[in-house]
Amino acid sequence: MSIRRDVRPTWAEIDLGAFTRNVDAVARLLPDGSRLIAVLKANGYGHGAVELARRCAPDRVAMIAVALLEEAIELRRAGVELPLLVLGPLTREQVVMALDENVTIGVCGPEELEDVCAIARERDVAIHLKLDSGMGRMGVTESELPRVAEMIRATPRLRVEAVYTHYASAGEDDDFTAAQTASFDRMRGVIDAPLHHLANSAATLRGNVRPGDYVRCGIVLLGAFRHPERSEGPGGECGAPPLPPRSLATLGMTLEPVLKWRTEIMRLKDLPAGQAIGYGTAFRTERTSRIATLPVGYADGYDRLLSNRGEVLVRGRRAPVVGRVSMDLVTIDVTDVAGASLGDEVELLGETITAQELAEKTSTITYEIFCRISARVPRVYR
């Protein structure tokens, strides 16, 4: 039965203790002088940024990174005192707002830097400057460096606190990652700073961290990682970070899933062979079947591509999704689940039905699986 009767019978349970233990495990993995930047953008990948940020202890987490200024302001308004970094581009007005909120700015290109330099003529400004080492999205390119360096030299009240870059394929392509690191080091010869951060979750797990460099980890703090022996799906930033060549046990690490998405059986019926189920009659029973209906659907983020191919966990056994996933309802076949009853708790995502499994069945990535669990699914924290 549900652990909560004061919310709808579909909910996401967030284990804050597991998050704290994952943070500790990653922090212990880092080399001397390195610190962890916890990436909690997109509402902590759907887990709840405020609640997770409150569990980030200063001795473990040096800074929290988000994508949008609004996300940083929400954390400040909630009383989060750790240093905050906005990774995404900001308008001139937003730069002023960020400074007023004591939020650090990640500058992604010369155009944005022009606005920052104009503001720095009137007040002290500290920034993290992003360098494009080969990903080709945001960041200062090598050809733009001379212009950027001159702008910085001409603005005494502007301080470059850190330079950073982003790996495109740290979980898959060691050669390209090495080339990005070399490019970053060349660019640092033109513009350097006291702090550097390059490694994402995948690079951190694989040990691609130099002593003293900070790391930016998000998905791994949520316990999402890929077992190569179980999956041929994409890795690195394309999926859950793959495990390093050595096992987590060898590294002395244990990572725990933080989010469990659950619902309950709200209708049970016995149907004869040949009975159509769901929109478009996309499924027909081949035998007398016991069919359960769940109060969850694609409006909650349960992908329609899981129609007739997804599985859920009922009473410790897998049960297939049958028929099309609709906006608010999913039907499953519990014929082979002995004792299946009204009110039984159903795991949609958790320790057995992993985010990686759902991502592979819907041709997407674990990040999206978490992020699209909609706001109408209550989050229950423990």
Image (tube, grey):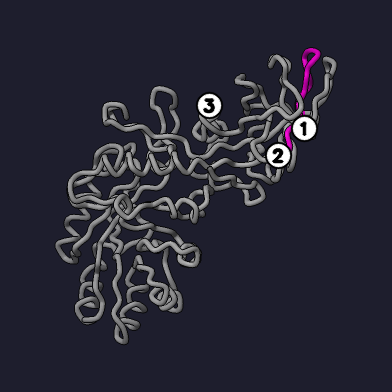
Q: Amino acid at mark 1?
A: Met
Q: Amino acid at mark 3?
A: Thr
Indicate the position of residue 163 as horizontal and vertical percent values. Answer: 25, 61
Tell me the residue at 39%/63% (across/down): 81
In the figure, is residue 208 to the left or right of 301? left
Pointer 3 and pointer 2: residues touching (CB < 8 Å)? no
Task: Please say whether residue 33 is visible from this viewpoint.
Answer: yes
Work out which residue is located at the far bottom of the displayed protein and give it.
122
In the figure, is residue 305 to the left or right of 205? right
| Residue 352 badge | 3
| Residue 165 badge | none
| Residue 266 badge | 1
Q: Residues within 10 Å of mark 1 (few under 14, many from 20)?
A: some
Disc 2: which residue = 9
Start-end of magenta stretch: 282-297
Q: CA distance from mark 3 to mark 1?
A: 22 Å
Indicate the position of residue 245 as horizontal and vertical percent values. Answer: 28, 29
Q: Residues within 10 Å of mark 3 (few under 14, many from 20)?
A: some
Q: CA distance from mark 3 to mark 2?
A: 20 Å
- Return the residue nearer the eye: 10 or 6: 6
Q: Earlier in the sequence, mark 2 or mark 1?
A: 2
Q: Earlier in the sequence, mark 3 or mark 1?
A: 1
In the figure, is residue 381 to the left or right of 163? right
Say if 23 sits above or below 89 in the image: above
Work out which residue is located at the far left of the displayed protein and give it.
189
Q: Residues within 10 Å of mark 2 (few under 14, many from 20)?
A: many
Question: Which quadrant of the figure contains the N terminus?
Answer: top right
In the figure, is residue 279 to the left or right of 222? right
Q: Secondary structure at mark 2?
A: loop
Q: Nearer the viewer, mark 3 or mark 2?
A: 2
Q: Quadrant of residue 350 in the image? A: top right
Q: Amino acid at mark 2?
A: Pro
